[in-house]
Image: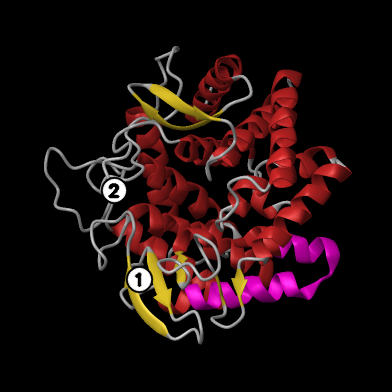
């Protein structure tokens, strides 16, 4: 049995056990080795749904299908009640839940729910400033002009909606936001800002900053990871070579700074000592992103070997040094993820998005399937 298959089998077993543990609730981050649960009110809840669909595709076991379908019903209710949707993470929520159901089952109701989600994300576009507002309501004093790099993983929802409907507005907004993100969030040295602020009235650039990184000018590793995967996906949908180049630049920066055990700390600029926190979730996201990036590069690309080596090193370390393999009662798949070290919020715990991208990367490595719930239609 390959290392990847062994890790998938362990993940499937833990996910099966978690179905009974969680019932109708959703895991977010952990405390004292137990996931904190919520009633579908967090930005992270799509990742649990996505894991269930991954396990169903892998096993064809109806226990995963039924649990995943229950999560989609919950997302239907969340949309109907407009509950906790005043942010841009609509793509994380609905690409991995209702869109995944559409991909696997061609369920028309799931497709329509996903299109409603795309409309909800479109409502966050600010035509005066020409960006998708990350957080808060329109006109919010603090966040009205803010974008964050995480949104690159929400844009595939809009590209997909264009493909399903032919309505070019979805694609146009996604491209406008991707171009703005490329120009202002990606620095000249191939590092990235977590967030950037604009004047909401005219889109004039104001300043870069961070919400979860070490400092405004530092490079938060999870933000860099979102950029690697997100720009590769924007390339898939648009074939704009600038997006592929940007993903490659961000990936090179990330891999050149891997520490000795090949799993990154929480920020590339944080002082490293015995107490410095890791972020296994950043390495998991990057691994999934590298697989997407590599799928678009020719076989003779001069940096392919470098990228493949970084991918193998990262995933091998995650499986051997960070995964909970051999801990059958563990709820999470990856230890030593960080949510917000800066705020002291789950700085060294399980992260449901880390578990999701770890499992997605394993599935892609083992089965050779590209895209999963972002790219596939």
State which region is magenta: 159-181
Q: Is residue 73 above or below residue 235?
A: above
Residue at the location (42% across, 36% down)? 351
| Element under disc 2 | loop
Q: Quadrant of residue 123?
A: bottom right
Percent across and percent down for residue 325 are 42, 20
Percent position of residue 102, x then y: 80, 44
Q: Nearer the viewer, residue 264 or 151?
A: 151
Most extreme residue toward the right is 108
- Location of residue 24 with respect to 239 vertically, above or below: above
Reply yes or no: does residue 180 show up in magenta: yes
Q: Position of residue 135 (x, y in %)?
A: 49, 60
* Residue occupied by mark 2: 266
- Identify the element where label 1 is drawn: loop
| Magenta stretch holds residue 257 | no
Residue 240 in sight from this viewpoint: no
Tell me the residue that label 1 is attached to: 190
Determine the residue positioned at 39% across, 50% down. 309
Q: CA distance from mark 1 to mark 2?
A: 17 Å
Name which residue lies at 45% across and 64% down: 148
């Amino acid at each position: 049995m390959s290392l990847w298959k062994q890790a998938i089998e362990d993940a499937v077993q833990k996910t099966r056990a978690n179905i009974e543990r969680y019932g109708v609730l959703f895991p977010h981050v952990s405390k004292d080795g137990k996931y904190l649960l919520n009633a579908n009110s967090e930005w992270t809840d799509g990742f649990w749904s996505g894991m269930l669909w991954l396990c169903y595709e892998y096993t064809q076991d109806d226990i995963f299908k039924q649990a995943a379908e229950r999560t989609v019903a919950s997302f239907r209710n969340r949309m109907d009640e407009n509950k906790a949707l005043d942010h841009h993470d609509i793509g994380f929520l609905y690409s991995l839940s209702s869109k995944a159901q559409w991909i696997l089952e061609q369920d028309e109701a799931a497709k329509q729910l996903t299109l409603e989600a795309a409309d909800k994300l479109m409502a966050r576009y600010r035509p005066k400033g020409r960006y998708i507002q990350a957080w808060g309501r329109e006109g919010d004093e603090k966040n009205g002009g803010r974008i964050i790099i995480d949104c690159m993983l929400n844009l595939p929802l809009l590209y997909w909606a264009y493909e399903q409907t032919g309505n070019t507005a979805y694609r146009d907004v996604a491209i406008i936001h991707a171009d703005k993100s490329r120009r202002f969030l990606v620095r000249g040295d191939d590092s990235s800002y977590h967030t950037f602020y604009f004047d909401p009235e005219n889109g004039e650039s104001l300043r870069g900053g961070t919400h979860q990184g070490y400092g405004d000018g530092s490079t938060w590793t999870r933000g860099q990871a979102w950029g690697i995967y997100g720009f590769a996906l924007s390339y898939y949908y648009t074939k704009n070579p600038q997006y592929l180049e940007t993903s490659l630049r961000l990936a090179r920066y990330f891999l050149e700074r891997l520490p000795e055990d090949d799993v990154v700390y929480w920020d590339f600029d944080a002082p490293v000592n015995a107490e410095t926190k890791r972020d296994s979730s950043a390495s998991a996201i990057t691994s999934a992103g590298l697989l997407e990036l590599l799928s678009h590069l020719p076989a003779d690309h001069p940096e392919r070997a470098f990228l493949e080596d970084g991918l193998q090193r990262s995933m091998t370390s995650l499986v051997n040094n960070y995964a909970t393999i051999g801990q059958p009662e563990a709820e999470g798949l990856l230890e030593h993820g960080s949510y917000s070290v800066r705020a002291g919020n789950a700085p060294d715990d399980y992260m449901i998005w880390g578990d999701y991208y770890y499992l997605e990367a394993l599935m892609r490595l083992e089965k050779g399937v590209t895209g999963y719930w972002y790219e596939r239609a």
